[in-house]
Image: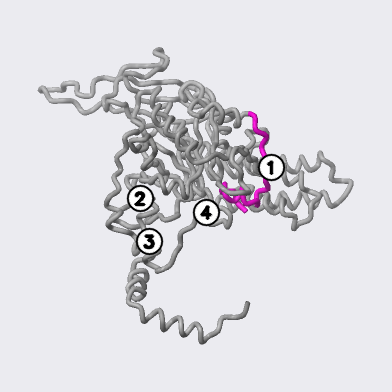
């Protein structure tokens, strides 16, 4: 291989300018950027966001803001469906700030444990480097959110609202990372000092740092409630303790001179809750409950009742293999991460079965691939034929999913929620309705239209309840011994693990 010849570059420039198609493409892209210039108007206008299978109650679209909590939002959006049905309301939102507080606390604890476990490693050790680099990131997976629910519970959003730091986490994360890395340096220095640094001393240093972590999180996110008073307007079909219900006066009680009175003020404390029929009947009051009690009473959802299926084709990624990524358990004693590799049709049919039963599905995808996110005329469309990138650049850019995984061109970067699907006559998916967590003003009213082909190319992960998984697949999930992979392995990279 030699250096680039300057004469060759001049020839390329001359040839480029001589072609009319090149000049048109250049003018379009330099004025409006790649995606807007590549969008295929004729194809884009054929997509319809109508779905033969669609979840009835989806709730108001949530917004993770400038944080990496998509996995938590996706999981909570699945869990809240059960709460909305129980309370007979059209919307309900759990506090993601509450989840974030305990996620960060658990990650700090696990990170310091790993620092102590690797205390004898040199500074340039790859495992130590991974722990120090990514131990306090915002990222995560569905099972992490389920572990948080099982251990710490849930609270309504207004019991612990979003803060500046939960909405935009970079500044808080920077200080948490500094605090933990400072503790790591202290622990490693004490170990190098020799006999004076026994296990007890290292544990004491960890305990001191954990107290500081809690304090910093409380400063940034507020103190998580130990107990709170639940007050929420519920529908007339709510399946709750009748002793905790009180009637709400009719909204159109006649006033003086025959005029209708002003609507009775609802002091509901559950952000976003409204009853299914748009006509409130009862107020649910449950005073002094803990987050765990709230989850047990009002979230009829088993956080351990799920299977994580992925589709990672390739000779080095055989079907029916279960993977476990090392150094990626953010909760000490929590659920080990586990991903079962199956052909795409297994993922699709499990998701369809769940949606037909009215249960939303957590899913993961490489969301920015072939996504004209910021164009105005066709927002929120994910399709492999909606952008004519090959025509725009005059070259072949197509790749198979297997090749993309092999060379790290794609990975599972973003978690969202399937809320519906359009099927063809054979029962195969044509398009998916996807609830995102970028707010109602992003994409199309907060939702994405995702073609089946796009999901097959850039998707490849669903989390479904066990009852929607075929028996033979469920047996593999329960019994297959997971293969350990390092976090920098190509499998881990495909799964979206930081490397």
Judge from the rendering whether residue 14 lies leftward or rightward of residue 149; answer left or right.
left
Query: Against 194, is 471 above or below?
Result: above
Nearest to N terminus: mark 2 or mark 3: 3
Residue matched to label 2: 381
Count of picture labels: 4
Q: Which residue is mark 4?
A: 410
| Farthest-out residue, bottom | 7
Earlier in the chain: of badge 1 and badge 4, it is 4
Q: Are marks 3 and 1 in contact (CB under 8 Å)?
A: no
The residue at which mark 1 appears reads as 484
Task: Residue lying at the far left in this picture: please name it.
Answer: 257
- Distance, label 2 to label 1, CA atoms, is 36 Å
Could one spot residue 70 in this view of the protein? no
Would residue 481 be counted in the magenta stretch?
Answer: yes
Q: Does any portion of residue 126 appear in the rendered image?
A: yes
Residue 353 point in image, percent of width and height: 43, 30
Q: Which residues lie in the magenta part? A: 479-499
**Dot 4: element:** loop
Which of these two is toward me, 112 or 219?
112
Sequence-wise first label, 3 or 1: 3
- Element type at mark 1: strand
Does the CB distance between marks 2 and 3 fall below 8 Å? no
Residue name at image x 38 percent, y 46 percent: 451
The Cα–Cα distance between marks 4 and 3, rounded to whole angstroms, is 18 Å
Q: Up-down: is 474 above or below 179? A: above
Structural crowding at the residue carrying mark 1, measured as other residues with C-alpha within 10 Å and reported as few (<14), some (14–19) or many (≥20):
some
| Residue 499 vs residue 440, the one in the foreground | 499
Are the residues tagged 4 and 3 within 8 Å (C-beta)? no
Percent across and percent down for residue 269 are 39, 30
């Amino acid at each position: 291989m030699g250096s680039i010849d300057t004469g060759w570059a001049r020839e390329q420039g001359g040839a480029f300018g001589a072609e009319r198609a090149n000049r048109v493409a250049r003018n379009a892209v330099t004025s409006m950027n790649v995606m807007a210039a590549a969008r295929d108007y004729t194809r884009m206008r054929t997509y319809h966001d109508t779905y033969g299978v669609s979840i009835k109650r989806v709730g108001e679209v949530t917004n993770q803001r400038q944080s990496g909590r998509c996995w938590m939002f996706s999981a909570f959006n699945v869990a809240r469906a059960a709460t909305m049905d129980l309370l007979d309301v059209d919307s309900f939102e759990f506090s993601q700030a509450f989840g974030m507080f305990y996620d960060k606390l658990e990650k700090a604890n696990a990170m310091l444990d790993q620092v102590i476990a690797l205390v004898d490693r040199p500074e340039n050790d790859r495992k130590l480097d991974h722990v120090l680099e990514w131990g306090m990131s915002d990222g995560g997976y569905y099972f992490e959110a389920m572990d948080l629910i099982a251990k710490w519970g849930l609270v309504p959003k207004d019991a612990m609202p979003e803060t500046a730091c939960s909405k935009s986490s970079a500044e808080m994360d920077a200080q948490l990372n500094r605090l933990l890395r400072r503790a790591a340096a202290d622990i490693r220095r004490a170990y190098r000092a020799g006999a004076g640094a026994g296990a007890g001393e290292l544990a004491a240093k960890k305990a001191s740092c954990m107290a500081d972590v809690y304090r910093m999180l409380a400063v940034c996110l507020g103190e998580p409630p130990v107990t709170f008073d639940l007050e929420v307007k519920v529908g007339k079909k709510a399946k709750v303790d009748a002793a905790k219900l009180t009637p709400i006066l009719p909204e159109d009680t006649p006033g003086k001179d025959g005029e209708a009175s002003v609507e009775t003020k609802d002091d509901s404390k559950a952000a976003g809750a409204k009853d299914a029929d748009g006509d409130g009947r009862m107020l649910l009051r449950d005073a002094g409950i803990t987050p765990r009690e709230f989850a047990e009473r009002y979230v009829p959802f088993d956080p351990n009742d799920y299977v994580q299926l992925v589709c990672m084709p390739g000779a080095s990624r055989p079907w029916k293999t279960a993977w476990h990524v090392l150094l990626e358990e953010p909760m000490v004693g929590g659920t080990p991460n586990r991903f079962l590799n199956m052909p795409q049709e297994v993922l699709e049919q499990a998701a369809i079965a769940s949606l037909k039963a009215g249960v939303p599905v957590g899913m993961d995808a490489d969301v920015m691939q072939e996504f004209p996110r910021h164009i105005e005329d066709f927002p929120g469309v994910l399709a492999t034929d909606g952008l004519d990138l090959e025509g725009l650049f005059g070259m072949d850019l197509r790749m198979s999913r297997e090749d993309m995984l092999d060379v790290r061109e794609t990975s599972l970067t973003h978690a969202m929620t399937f809320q519906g699907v359009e099927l063809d006559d054979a029962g195969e998916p044509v398009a998916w309705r996807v609830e995102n967590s970028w707010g109602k003003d992003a994409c199309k009213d907060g939702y994405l239209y995702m073609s089946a082909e796009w999901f097959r190319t850039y998707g490849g992960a669903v989390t479904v309840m066990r009852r929607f998984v075929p028996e033979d697949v469920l047996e593999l999930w329960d019994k297959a011994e997971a293969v350990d992979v390092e976090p920098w392995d190509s499998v881990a990279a495909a799964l979206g693990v930081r490397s």
